[in-house]
Amino acid sequence: MEQQHGILVLNKPKGLSSAQTIARIKRLGQKKIGHAGTLDPMATGVLLVLLGNATKLSGYLLEGGVKTYGGTLRLGVKTDTWDAEGSIVSETKLQEEDLLPGSVLEQAARREVTAWLNVTEQPVPPYSAAKHQGQPLYKLARAGMEVPAKVKSIHVSYADVQWVNMPDVRFRVTCSSGSYIRSLAHSLGIRLGCGAMLTELTREYSHPFGLDVAHTLDEILADPERLPEWIMPISAALPDWRNITVGNVQEANLKNGIPVPHQQEFGDFRSGDRAVILARDGSPLALAEARMDRDRPVWAVLRGLFTH
């Protein structure tokens, strides 16, 4: 199959890493391929697969994009990876009264999940792809080396408990891109004093796509000829970016790195306006922002989307 250009919204299966999942689709002739937002092997749900020219969108998709997850955590168990995939570090035997509906521990767990709304930073899991001096932390951890403590800023806009069946707590959370749900579960366990690990996770939404438009890997591999019809256009991935049509001369200038003059019909000029997709005959050519060039307003290319 020829190289496709656009976004494939995939419902990643459990047990495969994001890279392994991408490799399966790459075998369908899609040599230029990537993804936005990594999912751990244990996790399922929305994985945005970028094909062809859409691979240039990664940074812009992750920038400010929120994600919604549904997950389950278990109280009383702590692992080295902060989820059920790791080795158990410690276990706390919960009292019989703790396991009863409405127990003090259950009420505390409910409060702590809601308290995620106040979280502004979190520790980075030692088994993660975050890097220290060029090395992923998980490589240092697997080698038995000391993993430096890292903290990252996050924003949680929604957090709620869906059900509790002690010692398991089911929750839903909406947070900024790059947040570690494992870390939220782990920190909750520390605050409760009994430990906790993530046991299940599904990404339900990755801006701007949800599970309702996702396709399973089995579905794609079983009928690869339908891949083109399942691919979303580049413009669909950036719904808040204005689309501006350019002419032949402007298209040629763009491909040569020459800024396109900002026309009044495009709206009020705002320096730094990045919400612009320059297109020709419906085909995206570039992401652009408004700049001043020799005292004249222009659309300056941020990222070319055309095929050379």
Image (cartoon, grey):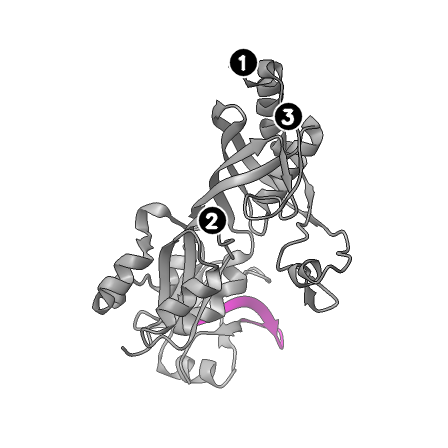
Give how far apart the Cα atoms at labels 3 and 2 are. Answer: 27 Å
Q: Answer yes or no: do the residues labelled 3 and 1 have beta carbons within 8 Å?
A: no
Mark 3 is surrounded, within 10 Å at the Cα level, by few (under 14), some (14 to 19) or many (20 or more) other residues, namely few
What segment carries the magenta color? 285-299
x 47%, y 60%: residue: 18
Can the viewer see residue 199?
A: yes
Amino acid type shown at disc 2: Ala
Tag 1 secondary structure: loop
Could you tell me residue 180's position as x and y percent?
59, 47
In the drawing, what numbered circle is on residue 102?
1
Query: On residue 302, which mark appears?
Result: none
Q: Quadrant of residue 157?
A: top right
Spatial CA distance of label 1 from label 2 is 29 Å
- Residue at numbered disc 3: 93
Judge by depth and name the residue closer to the eye, 165 or 269. 165
Residue at 45% x, 83% y is 255
